[in-house]
Image (cartoon, rainbow, N blue to C red):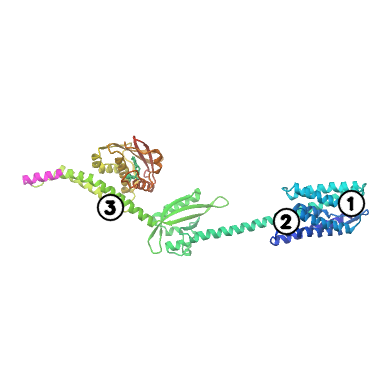
Amino acid sequence: MILLDYIVNLSIFSLMVSTPLVIRSFSSHRSLKQLRIWVGVYAGVVSILLVALSIHQQGYSYDIRYAPVILVFAYLGPIAGTITGGFALFARLFSSGHWTPAIIGWILIMISFIIIHILTKRHLPVKKCLYLYVSYVVIYIVTVPIIFNVLRHEPLFHFQYMLFVLLGVILGALLIESYERLHRIIIEKKQMEKSLAESESNYRLIAENTSDLIMVMKRDHSVQYFSPSHELVLGYRGVKLEKFELCKFIHPDDVRMFRDTIEWMFENKASVSMEFRFHHKDGYWIEFESRCMPVECENNSVEHIVIISRDISERKKAEEILLQSEKLSIVGELAAGVAHEIRNPLTTIKGFIQLYKKEKGPIEFNELLLSELERIETITSELLSLGKPQAIQLKKTDLRDLVESILELLAPQALMNNIQFKLTFENPDFLIICERNQLKQVFLNLLKNAFEAMPEGGEIHVHLRNGIDGTVIISVRDEGCGIPEELLPRLGEPFYTLKEKGTGLGLMICHKLIKQHHGRIHYQSEIGEGTLVEITLPVAS
Ligand code: ADP
Ligand code: MG
C-alpha cells in the first residue's frame, strides 16, 4: 500500500513540477527577480500539497515536502528556497504534532542550505541538489532519531523516508533539466532563424543595391540569380536572362574560354578571375571583369558558382588610350634615330641620281640603289605599324624574327648611344602565339630602359632559350646602373619612376601585355653591375 501511495505522491509532484515549465516554454520571460519569488511561492504550495498527501504508517506520517525545497534552493537560490521552506514548515506544523524536532530541524536545514548555496555558487544546479540532499540527510539523522529519539529503532523507516525524498529530488531535477535543455534548443533555434533572416536580408540588400553585377550559376550553366544591376548595365530584365543558358549572351570568341574556366572550377573547386564580353540588349558588347567563386555544398561538391562582375569597358578604353600614347611617345623618340638611318641610304641614292644626271644618261636601278630603297621602306613601315592603332590579331610568330626586327629598328639609336646589341639563341626558331605589335612594344620599352640605364654606352645581351613546361624565355641584360633590391617589387606599378622625365608607365604596360600573353616577367639586378629582365612565354602548341 505504501508503495502505491508513494507513486501517487510522486506522480502528482512531477505533474506540479512540469506544469510551470511547460507554461514557461510557451510564454516569454518576465523579470527574473519577481519570477523567483513567485516560483518559490508556487513550490511552497506544492510542498503543502505533498504534506496533505503524506503517507501515514506506524503512527508517523512521512512526506516528500523537502524535495521541492531542495530543488528551489538549487535552481533559484536562497530567497525563493526559504519561501518554499516556510510553506513546507507551515504545512508540517498544521498537519501533526512533534513541533520541536520539526522546527529545530527546519532551522538547521535552512541554515545549512544557505551555507551550501554560498559555497557552491559556481556549481551546476544538479550538483547543488546532491550537496543539499546530503546535508538534509545528515541533519535529519542527527535530529530525528538521534537527538529527539523519534523511531530510533526503525532504521528501515528512516531509510525509506530518505529514499522517497531522494527519488522526488531526482525526478524533479530530471524534469527541470530536460525542460531547460529543450528551452535552450528552442531559444537557440529562434535566434538562429532570426540571425539567418537578418543576414539574408543584409545580403539581399547588398546584392540588390550594388553596382557590381552578381549572379549565381548552376551546374548546367543556367542562372539561378541575377542581381537587378544586370538590368541597368545590360538592358535585359532579370527574368528574361534566367530563362537562357548564360553562354548565349557571351561573345562567340570568349564562349570557349568561359565554358572551360567554369568546368575547371566545378572540378577543382577554386576561384578564378576572367574577362569576357557580354551582349547588351541594344546589340553591342560590354567588357566584363569577373571574379568567380565556387560554392561548396554539404557533401563538398560544387553545385553553384557565384560570379561578381563589373563593367570595365571605360577602363579598357582608357588603357587603350594610355597604351597608344605611350607607344607614340616611343615612336616619337625613335624618330631622330630613324631620320638618321634614312638619311644614309638617301645620300647614297641622291649621289647616284646626281651621277646619272651629270652623265645625262637614263637612270639605271642597280642592286645597291634597290637595297637602299628597300631599307628605307622597311624602316618607315616598321615605324608606321608601331604607331598605328591596330585590331588585335593573335598570330603564330617566330620570336627570334620579332626580336631581330626590333633590334634592327633600334640599331641607329644604339649607334648614337654607343651601345652594342648581342643577340644569342639556343634554337633556330621559337614559335609563339602573340600579337606582334604588342610584344614589339614590350621589347621596345625594355630596351629603352636599358638604354637609359647606360648613358655611357655598353653592351645589351638578348638571349633566347627554351624553359621548362613548354615555355620560351627571353632575357635582356644590360650593363647599366642597376636597381636597388628593395625597389624590385615596385617595378610595374603605374607611375613608378626614378627618372626626372620618366612616366613610370613603360613597365606597367609590359606587365599588362605579358599577362595578356599568359607569360611572366622576372627581374634581377645589382647596383652598378646591370639589370636582367626575363620574360617567360608559352610556346605555340
Ligand atoms: P620610366 O622608364 O618612365 O621611368 P618604367 O616603368 O619603364 O618607367 O620604369 C620604371 C623604373 O624602373 C625606372 O624609372 C627605373 O628606375 C627602373 N628601371 C627599369 N628598367 C631598368 C633598367 N634596365 N636599369 C635600371 N633601372 C631600371
Ligand atoms: Mg621606361
Marks 3/2: CA distance?
82 Å
Report the residue marked by disc 1.
101
The mark lying in front, picked from 3 and 1, is 1
Amino acid at the residue labelled 2 = Tyr
- Tell me residue 190's x, y (percent): 64, 58
Q: Quadrant of ligand 2?
A: top left
Amino acid at the residue labelled 1 = Pro
Residue 433 appears left or right of 348: right
Against 480, residue 206 (above or below) is below
What segment is highlighted magenta in the picture?
347-361
Magenta-colored stretch includes residue 24: no
* Residue located at (90% from left, 47% from top): 147
- Tell me residue 212's x, y (percent): 46, 58
Report the residue marked by disc 2.
179
Amino acid at the residue labelled 3 = Lys
Instruction: Give the mark, 3 or 1, whose residue is nearer the N terminus.
Output: 1
Instruction: Give the mark, 3 or 2, whose residue is nearer the N terminus.
Output: 2
